[in-house]
Amino acid sequence: MTKAALIPVFALVLLALFTGVALGLSRSGAIRRREVRMKDVALGGADLWPERVRKIAASYANQLEMPVLFYVLVALALPLERADGVFIALEWVYVVLRYAHAYIHMSDNVVPRRFLAFAGSAVTLLVLWVYFALRVLLA
């Protein structure tokens, strides 16, 4: 089960790396096109970037927030041997919802749709934690 439980982790790390690379490319492109001056954003100036860059930056920041709880959970579940089929299925639900959230965030950014993906992932993560806790405490 260890490999099966790690594949969703790899998929989520890939999403974080992808959004990080996309952010770097979009920022360097904006500077090259002179949409923003490097000296103006060197120490912040987040509101000076073009909208498309700000959307990617917000999505990237999101990949480094709530998913930390997912990574911790998997890191605990594996050595305690609590990553069963239900756990892995819930992992995939969480990862798919994170991908949907990132896609919406970086594309049309329709907030109600984005919120549904975010809320779905948050509820899934909560269910994962409760499931894990019960399996540990009732063992």
Image (cartoon, rainbow, N blue to C red):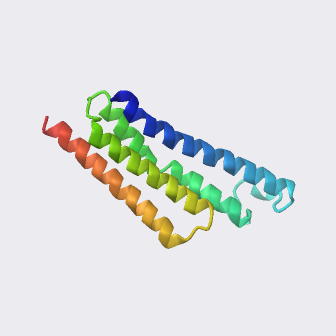
Place residue 35 in its image quadrant: bottom right
Classify 87 as above or below 111: above
Please indicate whether residue 97 sits to the left or right of residue 52 in the image: left
Q: Residue at x 45, y 38 (%)?
A: 9
Any part of residue 42 in sight: no
| Number of residue marks | 0
Classify 58 as above or below 133: below
Q: Position of residue 105 (x, y in %)?
A: 57, 62
- Placement of the C terminus among the 4 image quadrants: top left
Q: Position of residue 28 (x, y in %)?
A: 79, 50
Classify 61 as above or below 11: below
Please indicate whether residue 105 sits to the left or right of residue 37 in the image: left
Q: Position of residue 134 (x, y in %)?
A: 18, 43
- Placement of the N terminus among the 4 image quadrants: top left
Any part of residue 104 in sight: yes
Q: Residue at x 27, y 36 (%)?
A: 84
Q: Position of residue 106 (x, y in %)?
A: 62, 60
Q: Residue at x 33, y 58 (%)?
A: 123
Classify 15 as above or below 117: above
Place residue 51 in its image quadrant: bottom right
